[in-house]
């Protein structure tokens, strides 16, 4: 069965960087893209960006463009999302999700989420 | 960016009620719309894609309709498991924006 397992919660100081991992299993990793979505405490879902696990091509939301890098390691079927120059409003649960088989950018499987707290 | 606006933000309903949530796009997205359900502390769960295609395993009391800029999610007869927050998402163009969410509460 398809599973996406994310790295554990992290606490960072303002200005630092965080790298969240998302290890996929149960399918051929390079067949589907991965989307990253975040959710601030008590707030809605925010689309951050998408990466093709096949080619590595990316699309980022303008709000995080310049601070975010999404990558994949096909040898370990793992996707990564690195966010730099962290601010307090980056405190959120970060989710990875796999593309739907019939609709890229629709997430049919999700990771369990990773809480990133930015605090001095 | 395409703005997605859901209404209402909160909906109070009783078991067995028929409820409808609306999602409006700021521009034409044809049928490139998905609906998700999220429960507290959990990742969202995909219900519907391409505006009206029900995902495998999703109960048939859920249905989606619409095209262009106006879309609806209908639950025909509310069950206890349905009280959650619902989000629409457009994937017509980047960035793939979400609506702000509709919280479905027990009356």
Image (cartoon, helix red, strand yellow):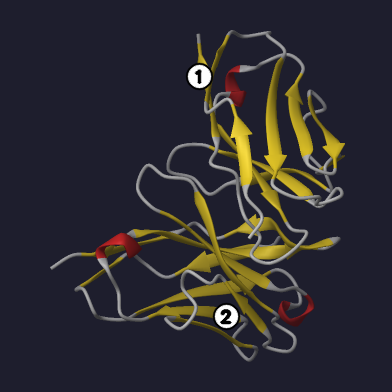
Question: What residue sits 42% from the left and 70% below the top?
Answer: A7
Task: Please state which of residues B89 and B2 is positioned toward the viewer in this rendering.
Answer: B2
Residue A76 lies, in percent from the top left, at 59, 86
Q: Which mark is residue B19?
A: none
Q: Crowding near pointer 2: few (<14 within 10 Å), some, many (20+)?
A: many
Residue A3 located left or right of residue A101: left
B8 or A35: which is nearer to us?
Answer: B8
Residue at the spot 69% in from the left edge and 30% down from the top edge = B22
Expressed as whole percent of the image width and height from the top left, the position of residue B28 reads 81, 50
Residue A33 pos. (x, y %): 71, 74
- Subunit ID for the residue under disc 2: A
Up-down: is B74 above or below B58?
Answer: above
Q: Which residue is mark 1?
A: B105
Secondary structure beneath dot 2 equals strand
Chain letter behind tag 1: B
Q: Residue at x 62, y 55 (%)?
A: B97
Residue that protrudes farthest toward the left in the picture: A120
The disc at residue A78 is 2
The foreground one among B38 and B94 is B94
């Amino acid at each position: 069965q398809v599973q996406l397992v994310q790295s554990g919660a992290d606490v960072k100081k303002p200005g630092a960087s965080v790298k969240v991992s998302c290890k996929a299993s149960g399918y051929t990793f390079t067949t589907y893209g991965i989307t990253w979505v975040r959710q601030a405490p008590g707030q809605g879902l925010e689309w951050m960006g998408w990466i093709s696990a096949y080619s590595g091509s990316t699309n980022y939301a303008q709000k995080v463009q310049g601070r975010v890098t999404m990558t994949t390691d096909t040898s370990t079927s793992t996707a990564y999302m690195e966010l730099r120059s962290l601010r307090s409003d980056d405190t959120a649960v970060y989710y990875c999700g796999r593309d739907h088989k019939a609709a890229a950018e629709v997430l049919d499987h999700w990771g369990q989420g990773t809480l990133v707290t930015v605090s001095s | 960016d395409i703005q997605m606006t859901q209404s209402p933000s909160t909906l109070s309903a009783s078991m067995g009620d028929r409820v409808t949530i609306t999602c409006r796009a700021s521009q034409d997205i044809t049928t490139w719309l998905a609906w998700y359900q999220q429960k507290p502390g959990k990742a969202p769960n995909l219900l519907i894609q391409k505006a009206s295609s029900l995902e495998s395993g999703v109960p048939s009391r859920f249905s989606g309709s619409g095209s262009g800029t106006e879309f609806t999610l209908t639950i025909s007869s509310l069950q206890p498991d349905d009280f959650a927050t619902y989000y629409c998402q457009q994937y017509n163009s980047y960035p793939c924006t979400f609506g702000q969410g509709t919280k479905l509460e027990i009356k």
